[in-house]
Image (spheres, helix red, strand yellow):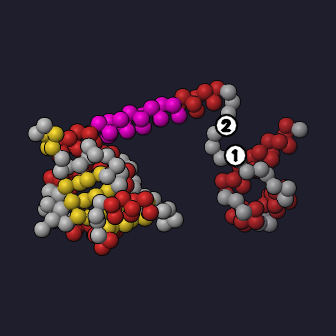
């Protein structure tokens, strides 16, 4: 006997699952057959999803509201999709995307084949978009640098009490580690301040 399961995912605990749960109810999924993860979709290492996989048997149906609820990375989604449809031999129904329904047949072409093709197209589009984003970012950074825009975290300013602490260190009354602790900075930052301070004095 085939069972109908639902999978619901949001990225964090404070996000609302009502829309996904409503879609599951309309699809006729019993509450005890709905598995919910409140975790990022960066990979499939999610406790409720892994439990769901163990429950799925050949011929069962898995419902998800949209493809991004399954995951974010299309390459990983394709691998997981093939595992579910070819190894577990279940049907997957993406409620918001009628073409991603492995039960359907169009002119004799199986839904599994159509869904696999659609996912490969989506994966290609996503990959092209990622490459375009990286290219736009690189071009933007290059243009900004030409205009003198500085990137990265701004360096910490030398505090007013630095000369006093520096003198104690130069007089060997405190160690480099102690001087850094007093100013609540790393050894590297303290050493950089020493160079800046001395250079500033020499340029005056």
The answer to which quarter of the image holds residue 150 is top right
Q: Is residue 41 left or right of residue 158?
A: left
Residue 43 appears in the figure: no
Q: Which mark is residue 150?
A: 2
Q: What residue is shown at x 31% (from left), y 52% (from top)?
A: 95
Nearest to the observer: residue 171 or residue 71: 71
Q: Residue furthest bottom?
A: 32
Per the rendered image, the range of residues in magenta is 120-137
Residue 200 appears in the figure: yes
Q: What residue is shown at x 19% (from left), y 66% (from top)?
A: 3
Q: Secondary structure at mark 1?
A: loop
The image position of residue 172, as x and y in percent, is 78, 63
Q: What residue is shown at x 89% (from left), y 38% (from top)?
A: 204
Q: Residue furthest left?
A: 108
Nearest to the observer: residue 170 or residue 88: 88
Mark 1–mark 2 CB contact (< 8 Å): yes
Decide: is 190 above or below 57. above
Q: Is residue 146 left or right of residue 69?
A: right
136 is within the stretch colored magenta:
yes
Q: Residues within 10 Å of mark 2 (few under 14, many from 20)?
A: few
Q: Residues within 10 Å of mark 1 (few under 14, many from 20)?
A: few
Decide: is 144 above or below 115. above
């Amino acid at each position: 006997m085939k069972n109908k399961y639902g999978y619901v995912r949001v990225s964090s605990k404070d996000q609302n699952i009502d829309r996904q749960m409503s879609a599951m109810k309309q699809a006729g999924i019993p509450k005890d057959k709905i598995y919910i993860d409140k975790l990022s979709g960066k990979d499939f290492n999610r406790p409720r999803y892994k439990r769901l996989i163990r429950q799925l048997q050949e011929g069962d149906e898995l419902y998800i509201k949209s493809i991004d609820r399954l995951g974010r990375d299309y390459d990983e989604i394709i691998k997981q999709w093939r595992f579910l449809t070819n190894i577990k031999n279940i049907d997957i129904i993406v409620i918001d995307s009628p073409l991603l329904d492995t039960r359907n047949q169009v002119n004799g072409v199986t839904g599994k084949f159509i869904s696999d093709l659609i996912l490969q197209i989506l994966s290609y589009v996503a990959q092209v978009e990622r490459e375009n984003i990286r290219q736009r970012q690189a071009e933007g950074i290059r243009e900004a640098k030409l205009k003198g825009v500085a990137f990265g975290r701004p360096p910490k300013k030398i505090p007013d009490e630095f000369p006093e602490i520096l003198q104690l260190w130069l007089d060997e009354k405190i160690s480099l580690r102690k001087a850094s602790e007093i100013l609540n900075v790393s050894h590297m930052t303290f050493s950089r301040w020493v160079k800046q301070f001395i250079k500033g004095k020499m340029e005056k």
